[in-house]
Image (cartoon, helix red, strand yellow):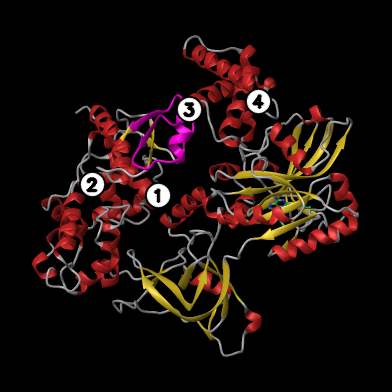
Amino acid sequence: MYSADQTRSLQELSQSLLQRLSQKGVTLKDLASIRKALVFHEYRYYILNDPLLTDSEYDTLYKALEKLESENPDSVTADSPTQRVAKSLTKSFPTVRHLVPMLSLENSYNAEDLLDWDRKARELTGLKELEYCVEPKFDGASISLIYENDLLVRGATRGDGVEGDEITTNIRQIRSVPLSAAFSRYGIEQIEIRGEVLMNKENFKKYNQQLAEQQLAPLANPRNAASGSLRIKDPAEVSRRNLEVFLYHISYFTSTGKKSPKTHSDSLEMLWDLGFRSPKKEKKVFRGIHSVVDYCVAFESGRDALPYEIDGMVIKVNDFALQDVLGMTTHHPRWAIAFKFKARQATSRLLKVEFQVGRTGSITPVAKIEPVPIGGVSVASVSLFNEDVVRQKDLRIGDQVLVERAGDVIPYIVKPLSELRTGKEKKIVFPTHCPACGDELVKVPDEAVLRCVNINCPAQVVERIIHFVSKDAMDIRSFGAANVSKFYELGFLPDVPAIYQLPFDKIAKLEGFGEKSIQNLREAIETSKKQPLHRVIFGLGIRYVGETTAKTLAKAVSYLPDFARFSPEELLAMEDVGPKVAGSIQQFFENHDNIHMLEKLEALGINLRNTRSERSGSGNLDGQSFLFTGSLNELKRSEAEAMVEAQGGKILGGVSSKLNYLVVGEEAGSKLEKAKKIPSIKILTEKEFLRFMGQAAGN
Ligand code: IVH
């Protein structure tokens, strides 16, 4: 899309615009340059995943454009970067007809199927050998885009293949979809492109964590997350979901020139060249079918390492003229076939449903199924989340069920195979009383869950302690859920503060507790006393207070019990704190038992105060980013990361020009190699990092 020369000059242009913005400002004459620079940087960020500006530099340019446009409304163009944002809610998604029906693909599952398909294609074309283009089969929601005279004019869902929903406003929220593209360079006037909208695995995990913090049922897989997101009527929410797109097929175009692509592979190159995210790097062209199979198998083994989900590969006859010869059936083209990866689904039998009590008293139905291997793991227990989910799916004890486990996502029941029912299946009866303490359960209006409201319910106490010691809270290694339950049953651990008063002499007499393991446990407990305040807050398990909110709260006080004096207005003034969260925080600090628990914890030496950097949120490493690779000797990875965060620094997920420091431990691999190629990244050993942190912390 951009040559090295163009990249250099656009970067220089951006730097000079930024410099002028910090001094005397810019004028209407700069509008086109600012737009050009922003489109370039969006491409670097969203398509190449290799930004050349920091977020704040990008924001500065963006705000300058917004300002110029608001002062000169006539200057706004439809493809201006500011025009992605929609100001109002979408009323409806009108039905639209695709220019060409969106057909599905025939499936194949093994080499034999592929050889068979290749033989038929060779017979129909009369050729000895065919050229194939092979690329991933993205597992998301399919869409079609129409560009006319270089402008994006329509985006639609697949629908029934003939007609879909018009979702242009939502499509514009996806930053990797160009609002304009220079198809005219290829003599193309109108073009319809197909692709797949995805939510990557990391964003999916984060999204589900947010749902869990609000006690909502998580989404089953990134595919459902993507397709659900496309139907949201609030475009701003669509934007927040950080959707991505891959465009992989040109279904129709009108052209005036001869420059338009003649093969599928060239069409992917063209799309890439015009600024689209196409599978240009992932695709490969082969002569004959045999190496195609090897490529598919190799891709399958690397499937889990990809940042997004794929469920197979797609093999396409490369030459458009031959595609025309092969044509299509009513369901699928004869020139393409999907090679499906091993299913991450299996069938099993629903044996019984148990009801687990969570730390906030919520009752979760858990299906016990006949153990079945899925993706290399034996699955025997599957959460059913709440009564609504059970009713919607019409699950019954004894049902044959379809179970799915996508990557590292928790397994779930897709549906019962109701056609296999014998009539002996039984309804799932929900309890009226708590299975742990026997108290009557409550159904709170507007909530899907049943709840045990006895805060002394033993199951809740155990779950609260498990949460307090967990990795993301106080991170007391070598404690673990099993030890919590055991110590609770033995009366050693009646509540959270008792963690710090464990009778180690008695524990030493228990089976399985050697000197070494007791020593480890003691040390881990001792170390946890110094954990930063946000971990203590998260560990308390206040309803609706997840890790992010805990960090916000930690910044707002210097001493945790001070929250008891906060007014609802003060709570609501904090970032990310809405009425539900504020109400829950207030309730927690109004409860004397909780205040008493905090007093006990403090008396036992647990830190309830804030460090300077946590409070101000602007430590000495503000704006600096770090990444750790290889194994560290003196620090745990999590400790090193926490040190950076405590000083206001950020931890990045990968090496890019956005990264400031790469800290290398032993046996560092590809990240180090990549970082060496980017001169702006400083590479530190663990020792250098520690010295550096000493300086950063002002020691
Ligand atoms: S080509 C006319 N290529 O898989 C053929 N489809 O199960 C057009 N899909 O409906 C489709 N990745 O939504 C094609 N690289 C890829 C794909 C892909 C995912 C989806 C697409 C299609 C479905 C068929």
What distance separates the C-alpha of mark 4 from that of mark 1? 48 Å
Mark 3 vs mark 4: which is more N-terminal? 4
- Residue 56 location (% of width, % of height): 47, 27
The amino acid at mark 4 is: Tyr
Residue visible at 33% across and 47% down?
Answer: 550
The amino acid at mark 1 is: Pro
What distance separates the C-alpha of mark 4 from that of mark 2? 48 Å
Does the beta carbon of the residue at mark 3 sit less than 8 Å from ligand 1? no
Residue 512 position by quadrant: bottom left
Q: Which residues are magenta?
A: 655-684
Quadrant of image for the N terminus: top right
Along the line of sight, the residue nearer the viewer: 577 or 51 = 51
The amino acid at mark 2 is: Gln
Badge number at residue 678:
3
What distance separates the C-alpha of mark 2 from that of mark 1? 28 Å
Residue visible at 54% across and 32% down?
Answer: 50
The amino acid at mark 3 is: Ile
Q: Residues within 10 Å of mark 2 (few under 14, many from 20)?
A: some
Residue visible at 81% across and 41% down?
Answer: 263
- Residue 199 location (% of width, % of height): 57, 49
Along the line of sight, the residue nearer the viewer: 548 or 690 = 690
Residue at the disc numbered 4: 2
Does the beta carbon of the residue at mark 1 sit less than 8 Å from ligand 1? no
Q: Is residue 514 left or right of residue 459?
A: left
Mark 4 vs mark 1: which is more N-terminal? 4
Mark 3 vs mark 2: which is more N-terminal? 2
Q: Residues within 10 Å of mark 1 (few under 14, many from 20)?
A: few
Q: Is residue 123 left or right of residue 604?
A: right
Residue at the disc numbered 1: 579
Quadrant of image for the C terminus: top left
